[in-house]
Amino acid sequence: MESTTSWFASWFDSPYYHQLYQHRNDEEAQFFMSNLIQHLAVSNEGRVLDLACGKGRHSIYLASKGLDVVGVDLSPESIAHAQQFGHERLSFGVHDMRESLEAYGQFDYIFNLFTSFGYFDTLEEHQETINQMAKGLKGNESRLVIDFFNAHKVIQKLVLKEEKTVGDIDFDLQRYVENGYIVKNIRFEDKGELYHFQERVRALSLEDFEGFLKGAGLEIEQTFGDFALNPFDLEESDRLILIAKPC
């Protein structure tokens, strides 16, 4: 079964995606969010958008701290799972990040976490997505946080072939760089049927993000290189975490 067109729509809505990446745990999410909201001095009156929230692990923790949180994601399956945790200060909805956020209002903080960007075919789509994020901010005191992988280090350390057994499925993973994208082919068999999914994430640099943000009327205020909010180092950091503000 081939599924490579609009890979992020089909793959993220697949139960196999959640099986392969089940090691992504709540403790890691809570550690990052605790450090981030402390650094930003987020008040309980703050309104937060978790853009591309997945099953809501970051959103749920943020709401537990008294924040008013909206989580949106393209995957109906992920949102259906997340909605069981909703309450008066936590809501979820299905949303394509390239589209207007007007229906959700504006936010003090917009968080786009765990490399939930770089998926699109054109630079124009990436720019439009940043434009929509900028329009979703309330004003000059609002902040946009983007958590992306450090593409430079990922490429330098790329594991070309890997086999990973998760549960009762053997995943065959192949990685390569093609036309500015880091590509991962994921093949496996389940119940006698062969599956192939593909991830394609644009290898965006700090300079790329500076350009997108400038085009949306934003500028980078700070950069960090990991969930402990240590400084970003091109060669050593695993993450590229950006805090941006209106110009």
Image: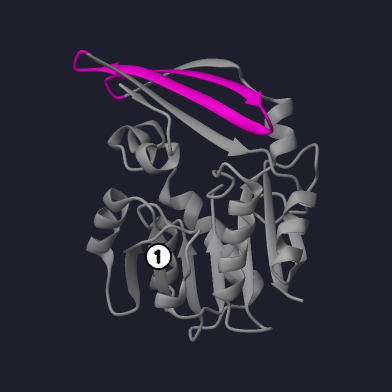
Q: Residue at horizontal 26%, vertical 62%?
A: 83
User: Residue 177 vs residue 220: left or right?
Assistant: left
Above or below for 191 versus 127: above
Badge 1: few (under 14), some or many (20 or more) residues near its Cα, within 10 Å?
many
Taking the spot 72% from the left edge, 72% from the top edge, the residue there is: 217
Q: What residue is rendered at 46% in x and 28% in y? A: 198
Q: Residue at x 54, y 58 (%)?
A: 112
Compared to 92, does 31 lie above or below? above
Left or right of residue 66, residue 233 in this image: right
Q: Residue 132 lies in magenta, yes or no?
A: no
The mark total stands at 1
Assign a secondary structure to mark 1.
strand
Residue tagged 1? 71
Rendered location of residue 122, percent (x, y)? 61, 45
Q: Residue furthest bottom?
A: 45
211 sits to left or right of 50: right
- From which residue to which does the magenta span run? 167-192
Q: Position of residue 137 (x, y in %)?
A: 58, 77
Residue situated in front as seen by the camera: 166 or 78? 78
Name which residue type carries label 1: Gly
For the N terminus, the image quarter is top left
Q: Nearer the viewer, residue 67 or 145?
A: 145
Give the quadrant of residue 194.
top left
Give the left or right position of residue 193, taking residue 146 as reference: left
Relative to 106, say whether 204 is above or below: above
* Image quadrant containing the C terminus: bottom right
Viewer can see residue 119: yes
